[in-house]
Amino acid sequence: MPLKDFLEASKGAIKEVTIGKEGKSATIGGEAVLPFHNFEGNLPRLPVMALEVWDTTPPETWPDHLRSHFGDVVNSPVLWAKKCLEVYKADLICLYLASAAEGEPDAPALAAKVKEIGDALPAPMIVYGTGEKDVDTLVLREVARACAGDGLLLGPVLKENHKEIAEAAQEYGHALIAQTPIDINLAKELNIKLSKFFPKERIVIDPLSSALGYGMDYSFSVMERIKQVAVLFGDDMMKMPIIANLGRECWRAREAKENDQQGILWEAITAMTMFLAGANLAVVGSPDSMKLVKKLLGQFSTGQIEV
Amino acid sequence: MGLTGLEIFKLLPKTNCKECGQATCLAFAMAMVSGKAGLDQCPHVGDEAREILGAASAPPVALVKIGAGEKQLALGNETVLFRHDKRFENPTGIAVSVCDTLDMEEVAARVEKINGLVFDRVGREYRIDLVAVCNCSNDRDRFAATVKMVAENTGYPLILITADPGSMEKALEIAGPGKPLLCGADETNYNAMTALARRYEAPLAVKGTSLDSLAGLVEKVAALGHKQLFLDSGARDAHLVLADQTQIRRLALKRFKPFGYPTITFASAEDPLQSVVEAGVYIAKYAGIVVIESVDPADVLSLITLRLNIYTDPQKPIAIESRIYEIGQPGPDAPVYITTNFSLTYFCMAGDVEASRVPGYILPVDTDGTSVLTGWAAGRFTPEKVAEMLTNSGIAERVNHRRVIIPGGVAVLSGKIRELSGWEVLVGPQESSGIPSFIKQLWRA
Ligand code: B12
Ligand code: SF4
């Protein structure tokens, strides 16, 4: 039958990025196909999911149905993170440095705290700064130094502060999240700048995720375009895996806050849609929505499937 | 258009009569390739040429209609694999199932819930599109009775799901004039099902057991003269459905004729929440129709919102007119809010102004339909534009104060706005959900 003649050969494979160190690591990327297209090429692994942990208590705006999963442990990032890993079975956690956004951060003290949290955990860690360029430069450089050799995934680095943070990440062996606002050209530009002195195998693209109903369409299309350019056209500067940091966006949405089940679905559908668009790693807030997506992904196969 | 300029040229009269407005037939052919001219503009083109050119310019996924009357649904007409290449045309039809094992009271109650699945979002009303009646009982009379009950109680077009032509025939005696989707034909029953579909001039879903078998079966059905079809590869596991949906769309775009129709999918995971996420996968990836079981508004709103995102035209953000909007019945001392004319931004914050129960005026500044921060970062949400709106919109004649509230995200604009407009500027919360408590504390006009 002629159907097989229509399968499309890909020109490029997404790079593999490993987060963590020996004994506790997670690898993302590596696919030589568009998202889940393993009917026409190899998909070595499924996307992974991180639960978000705040280094402060979560904000007032969190609805009870989200807060209640964590109970008391929200007062201790270590316990919170452990619960995410041990009870909720997240692949890894994403530590959000919310405290740095409140006034002048004490960078060395914050970095020591990050080190302590990371050491207490059996899984690798993403460390996510505030998105404010000067604060992050200060804090993330310290974190990179304090956690030397731990192989964190650190970010976001922006056009404005990529140099300072990437130098530290390079020196101390971390991977980086390169963030640009929903624009494929800006994403590529930042990757080019970084790869002049930073290994491409340690870059993860963050093209910005937005929540279902709140601009998700833009994130969806920019991710699809990046994957298309990387896999179908073989553009070396776009072959880095993609992170979708969507939990915080979703839990700001009115629809997620107003109803428990709707909240779970809001986040789960956003995550699954980002995966369909090409995200290799998603950061979410609710263990329930993570479980839901993981269960669905659990039915997806890796390798190559026959058509 | 699948043909090149030269291929089109060969089919034209080659008289260069200029009646089409082009200097030559060749120029006309080229204009057609680039979409600047249509075949109708040449009065001399022959029937044979018309047929070839018409087929080549028809959309690769046929437009197929379900139902009759006001709620008729048209699906298909798709032209791209990625929404960023142009846009997706006809939003996935969401069908909610009703099983004929329910007793009649339960059926009526379920249909009532289905009818109530109506949502307001960004200023428009959104609904589901179809009701799918399922012959789970395998009993012909029961199926017919359930179809009757549903048809009498809903205005939505129906999908009749049964593999038994006898059941289908009975159901069609009741629902046939409403042109339901017959679901449908398979290898064993396609002769009878196609005959029924033709008799009622209704669309027909064709179900294979693989892509290959589906292609074969579609050709047989088409050979019987029916071409209002929906495709079902038979896959039910999410990953395989996704693979098949993708292949079907891709092949359709490559003009593989048997796949040039919209598809139908079924969210069939046992866990109810998981089946919603599964339905989301199909909406994001090419499904013409997705059949779901849930009548829970939380589930349906999530899917309708996803559909809205995926089917929004990426080339034009939905913008609203930049003018004074009144929330409630604001008097001369009511608060005045500034926002942008991106419809999502406007309806988001207008909803919160409404929730505050304090009547107010909203002035969405024309930022070419961009959000607050995007507009600010792109230089389209500027103090100049805000000041101009305050001055020229006529708001100064409607209120007896000079105080304006701006979004917290653009607090930095306040000094300049004050300077340019003379209005006092109050910085509101970052997120509009904070407006109700903000306004209660701050507004003492
Ligand atoms: C989708 C999106 C886009 C889309 C455009 C969407 C659109 N139609 O506007 C695209 C991809 C085109 C885009 C482009 C750009 N973007 Co953009 N984009 C976003 C994103 C992800 C979501 C925006 C959105 O839709 N939000 C939802 C709406 C409802 O939010 P909102 O308008 O802010 O409204 C809320 C509040 O402001 C408040 N509010 C609204 N009105 C009012 C009124 C009052 C009185 C009050 C009190 C409150 C209030 O309530 C609302 C609900 O909470 C944001 C990141 C984010 N998560 O916010 C970045 C973001 C806004 N973009 C950003 C940038 C930099 C850009 C670009 C300039 C990048 C570039 N160079 O290409 C371009 C500019 C495009 C151009 N030239 O026109 C930055 C802005 C940074 C900054 N702080 O200045 C952001 C914040 C991303 C980031 N972190 O870097 N973007
Ligand atoms: S009207 Fe038809 S025949 Fe006349 S020049 Fe145009 S294409 Fe040629």
Image: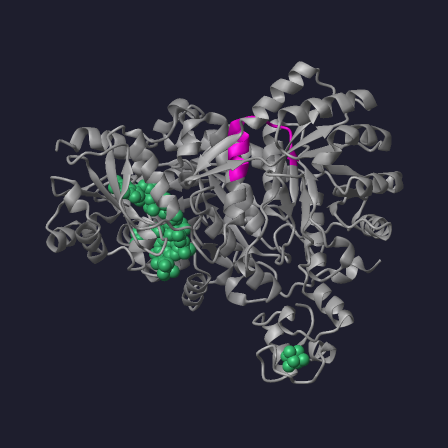
Task: Residue B339 in the image: state x and y as whole percent.
Answer: 28, 46
With B20 as the anchor, is A173 left or right in this view?
left
Any part of residue A26 in sight: no
- Identity of the residue drawn at 68% across and 75% down: B4
Decide if residue B24 is on the left or right side of residue B247.
left
Residue sitting at 76 percent across and 69 percent down?
B47
Quarter of the rendering containing residue B93: top right
Figure disc tally: 0
Does the magenta portion include A297? no
Decide if residue A50 is on the left or right side of residue B337.
right
Magenta segment range? B291-304
Q: Is residue A125 left or right of residue B240?
A: left
Q: Nearer the viewer, residue B294 or A182?
A: B294
Question: Residue B350 or A281: which is nearer the viewer?
Answer: B350
* Vertical arrangement, residue A62 with respect to residue B72, above or below: above
Front-lying residue, B65 or B384? B65
